[in-house]
Amino acid sequence: MPELGTDLRRAMQQIRPPVYSIVDVARRRNRRRRNQRIGSALLALTIAAAAVGLVVRAFSAYRERPAGRAISPRSVERLDLRWHASVDAGISFPAVADGVVSVGAFPLGKGSSELLVYPEHCAQRSGQCRPLWRTEIPSLFAGSAVANGMVYATTGQQGQPAKLWAFRATCRTDGGRCGPLWTANLGLGGAHVPVVADGLVYAGTWVGVEAFPAECRTDGGACTPLWRAETVLPTWVLTADDGMVYAGAAREGKYGVRAAEKGAVYAFPAKCTTPCEPIWSEDSLGGISDLFVDDGRVFVGTTAGPLSGRPGLYAFSADCIAGGGQCRPLWTADTACCTVGTAGDGMVFVLDMGKAVYGFRADCRVDGGSCEPTWTASVSPMSGAGEPVFRGGVVFVAGGLGQETVWAFPAQCRDPCRPVWSGSVGGSVLGVAASQTSLVTTGDAGLVVFSPDTRPKRRAPPDTPAALYVAIFVLVGLAALIRARHKGRGLR
């Protein structure tokens, strides 16, 4: 035992305790307090960030989140009735642009008609809308166009005295009557809708095409054309693009002009003089049912079809036509009578006799061969009256006589293509037009306008905000308690 005690004393002498000064002790205490404060601050910030995140998430889910006003494949699913207007008479195809909608009304059995202009975004949502202004026209209404703050209208049917009218789109807003800024006598009528492009207004006549300056005068007087061009048959469809004017000529037959067996297509330069000669023409396509231009291509819908052994749709190069050469079609398609269409987003959309809507690639080929559609949409029954309308990546098609439905198809669609939206207007729908924010239809129900619904979506129950406030109060209080506790420890 004495040896064990001696060993313990020797071992204790070898162990030297660390030597701390008062400064060292103070430093260690301050470092501990600093770490406690940093930890408390980080914890409080974490809790506060979580609380802020909950606030943002809750209110973003609860607050009003309007859908985009522009028509698109996404917003079209929320198209809703914006307003309507009853018209106690026959009604024309609509036109919409520059914030106004124009239509013609013609009572049956009367030789006069009326031009009605409405605000595109009427204040009476889902209700009856009153016109901004109107004007009485002493002949049958044919069609209208809106462009650059002006409304242009043509009156007179094929072979009847016709006239072109020009009005200021905002001439008044109290529903009263407006007078024209200028008019022009067209002789016997031809085209049903005037075309406006590059400061000129084009009208089809019984014997050709006439071009007028869009604002030739403002005193209500008569204008004379800048130039005239002759066509063998009455010009009834017009389109213009990139300094060129394209005219489709056909004589109205037993089943209307769109079922005419014979017709021709002409191309005129926009800058021309009387008599303006066509730089290109083609009269071997059969009756002309429609013309439209997009991305350097001129598309011609005809009254032919498979039963006649000829294509119903032709695509030509606009550059070739402008060069005045012998232009062969880039491609054709075997659609049935009577093909009408539109184009956009690298696609061509056509409707034939209301049987189906077809989507073709605009550049499907260049060797003159026949193209097959990338998608087909069959909506039965569909008797289709007006041309399909393309806007914002969506194609709209009217149901036609006896059908009260309008369909919307995405431009980029899978075969078979199904509508992304359909709307009922309460009567036969004969014509459609579209702006960036509105779909306009005319038919038995008068004028019916749809737009993407901008009302809020209720994505949270009514008691969510109260519960949220309680949660925020608890979190903030907990953060304050933790910080106070750590601060108290650090002062010990």
Image (cartoon, rainbow, N blue to C red):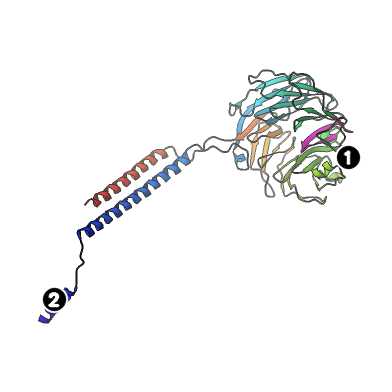
The front one of 214 and 117 is 214
Label 2 crowd bin: few (<14), some (14–19), many (20+), radius 10 Å: few
Q: Position of residue 103 (x, y in %)?
A: 71, 27
Q: Distance of mark 1 from mark 2, alpha carbons?
A: 126 Å
SS assignment for the magenta stretch, majority: strand
Q: Position of residue 75 (x, y in %)?
A: 60, 40
The front one of 140 and 171 is 171
The tag on residue 283 is 1
Give the residue type at disc 2. Arg
The front one of 227 and 50 is 227
Q: Mark 1 or mark 2: which is in front?
A: 2
Quadrant placement of the N terminus: bottom left
Mark 1 in CB contact with mark 2 (< 8 angstroms): no
Residue located at (64% from left, 31% from top): 449
Label 1 crowd bin: few (<14), some (14–19), many (20+), radius 10 Å: some
Q: Is residue 232 magenta?
A: yes
User: Label 2: which residue?
Assistant: 9
Above or below, 464 relative to 5: above
Q: Earlier in the sequence, mark 1 or mark 2?
A: 2
Q: Quadrant of residue 282?
A: top right
- In the image, is 22 to the left or to the right of 140? left
Range shown magenta:
228-249
Secondary structure category for the residue under label 1:
loop
The front one of 443 and 427 is 443
Q: Position of residue 410 (x, y in %)?
A: 66, 44
- In the image, is 407 to the left or to the right of 311? left
- Residue lying at the far right in this picture: please name it: 232
Give the residue type at disc 1. Asp
Secondary structure category for the residue under label 2:
helix
